Amino acid sequence: MINHKFVCGEPDFPVTVTFTQPAAIADFHVQPRRPLVILLPGGGYRFYSDRENEIVALQYLAQGFAVAVVQYQLVTDPPVLPTALIQLGMVVAEFHRHAAAYGISPDHILVAGFSAGGHLAALYADLWPLLGWDCHVATSELKIAALALAYPVIGLRLGWPTDEATKAAITAKWPAHEADQLVTPQNPPTFIWTTADDETVPASNTVYYTAALQRHDVPVTTKIYPHGPHGLSLARAVTAFPRKSGPTGEQFIRPDVAEWFTKEMTWLESLWHLDEFWLNQV
């Protein structure tokens, strides 16, 4: 395993990135170019949830992907937008520009966001063609190939946040924060899942974004599971809260929802023809 932390976007929009990739398999006598997942954990724009951080990164690493976890702007240093969008653009551009050095395929970049991280990811998928000026890079260096969202915030009018102070800390007066209203035909193919009775970020967020993508003929695969609380992560015991943390840990173990990662990998296989991608490494 290769792991290192770096900062890009300096001096105006510094952002810390933790980059991890599996070590090359010596028997193959080839240094592969790996798909890259840019991972945005949730946490209500207040922190980065550990339950959606390394433990999720490990799932992608086990599939041979490289992973970059991004510490985007939080409300502790308001406003979040548009700084977080520009930071994410700088990260995407960094990997496009130095793809060979990082051992990744710039044509196979997936941005994956959970909850509030999903809000940032969805906004980026909408707005990336417009960020070249702010990021001081060519627009082509901001392109991503796919988007994956887990119980995402999509519009700040759709149930989260519930207080104006948090909304102001996220947006200030920056108007482009309703992701479903910003979709264009240039959005990447999208995989999105949530639960119908999510008590924190209503499923309407997912429904609205899915409908917007469909209106613009953007390929989208949506899974809305019947039950489960917000923040399920892997929906397995390993990411469930221990009993000593409260009586609700069992709610975060949902075998039906836990299939989401396998479903996402099946979607990516269809989108990227991953068997051929790996077999044709040179």
Image (cartoon, rainbow, N blue to C red):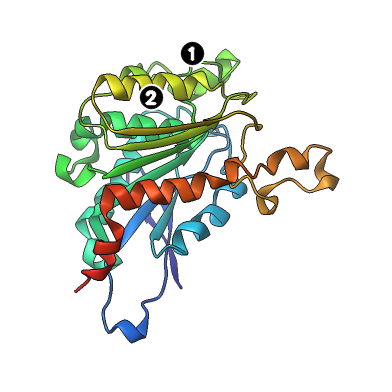
Q: Is residue 81 above or below residue 39?
A: above
Q: Quadrant of residue 184?
A: top left
Residue at image location 65% in from the left, 49% down from the top: 236
Q: Is residue 47 above or below residue 199?
A: below
Tell me if label 1 and label 2 are in contact, CB under 8 Å: no
Q: Is residue 9 visible?
A: no
Helix, strand or loop for disc 2? helix
Label located before the other in sequence (1 or 2): 1
* The C terminus, quarter of image: bottom left
CA separation, marks 1 and 2?
A: 16 Å
Q: Is residue 55 above or below residue 139?
A: below
Q: Quadrant of residue 174?
A: top left
- Residue 266, given in percent of the width and then of the height, sits at 39, 50
Identify which residue, 184 or 265, lies in the foreground.
265
- Residue 207, given in percent of the width and then of the height, sits at 45, 21
Q: Which dot marks residue 210? A: 2
Direction from residue 254 to residue 149 in the image, left or right: left
- Residue 119, given in percent of the width and then of the height, sits at 44, 30
Residue at image location 29% in from the left, 29% down from the top: 126
The amino acid type found where label 2 is placed reads Thr
Residue at image location 69% in from the left, 41% down from the top: 252
Residue under pointer 1: 157
The amino acid type found where label 1 is placed reads Arg
- Residue 48, given in percent of the width and then of the height, sits at 56, 43
Direction from residue 257 to residue 126 in the image, left or right: left
